[in-house]
Amino acid sequence: MAGMLVTTAAEAAGSLMVYENSNVSTTRVKIDLGTAANAVEISLVDLGSSAAKVIDFVFNSVNDAAADAALATPGSRIPVPVGKTYRHLVADGQSKITRIDFKARNAETGSNLVITFVKV
């Protein structure tokens, strides 16, 4: 069985940028990178009694309305459960990541942290 080599954002070539967003709830959060990223890691951490158990995110929405629509549509969004990390490495010739939008599926009443590593 052939395997796929998974490179973390920290291992990819380039400069590492880190974003931390606390107590993410149902209000969409937008990260405009200002440059193009070739690797991304997103993690949801429960800091104690977090009600948000899943965050959904999308890449490269053309505007806020498109991001809102994609985040509301299963199949258009990427879910990340609490305690897990999503890793995305952009293949050569593919569109690099310039924007990330995310929000929790349910209202936050505890404490959480979304950590986003971006390699540009």
Image: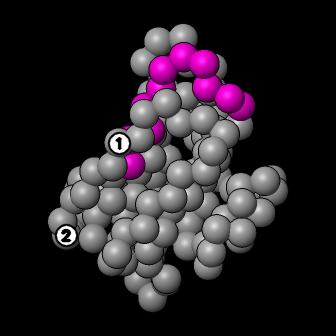
> With 107 as the anchor, is 86 left or right in this view?
left
From the top left corner, tell me how far across and down residue 63 is, in percent. 62, 75
Q: Who's the residue at 22% across and 59% down the image?
A: 16
Which residue matches tag 1? 20
> With 3 as the anchor, is 71 left or right in this view?
right
Residue 85 versus residue 116: which sits nearer the camera? 116
For the view shown, which residue lies furthest in the bottom direction?
A: 93
Q: Earlier in the sequence, mark 2 or mark 1?
A: 2
Q: Mark 2 is on which residue type?
A: Gly
Question: In which quadrant is the C terminus drawn?
Answer: bottom left
Q: In this picture, which residue range is highlighted in magenta? A: 106-116
For the view shown, which residue lies furthest in the top direction?
A: 49
Q: Mark 1 is on which residue type?
A: Glu
CA gap, disc 2 and disc 1 = 20 Å
Which residue matches tag 2? 14
Callout 2: few (<14), some (14-19), or many (20+) C-alpha neighbours within 10 Å? some
> With 106 as the anchor, is 103 left or right in this view?
left
- Name the mark on residue 63: none
From the top left corner, tell me how far across and down residue 6 is, in percent. 39, 55
Q: Is residue 51 above or below residue 69?
A: above
From the top left corner, tell me how far across and down residue 9 is, in percent. 31, 56
Q: Who's the residue at 38% across and 49% down the image?
A: 116
Q: Is residue 39 visible?
A: yes
Q: Is residue 4 visible?
A: no
Q: Who's the residue at 18% across and 65% down the image?
A: 15
What secondary structure is found at the residue carrying circle 2?
loop
Quadrant in the picture for residue 77: bottom right
Residue 91 in magenta stretch: no
From the top left corner, tell me how far across and down residue 91 is, in percent. 44, 76
What colour scheme was applied to this rendering of the protein? one colour
Residue 53 versus residue 29: which sits nearer the camera? 29
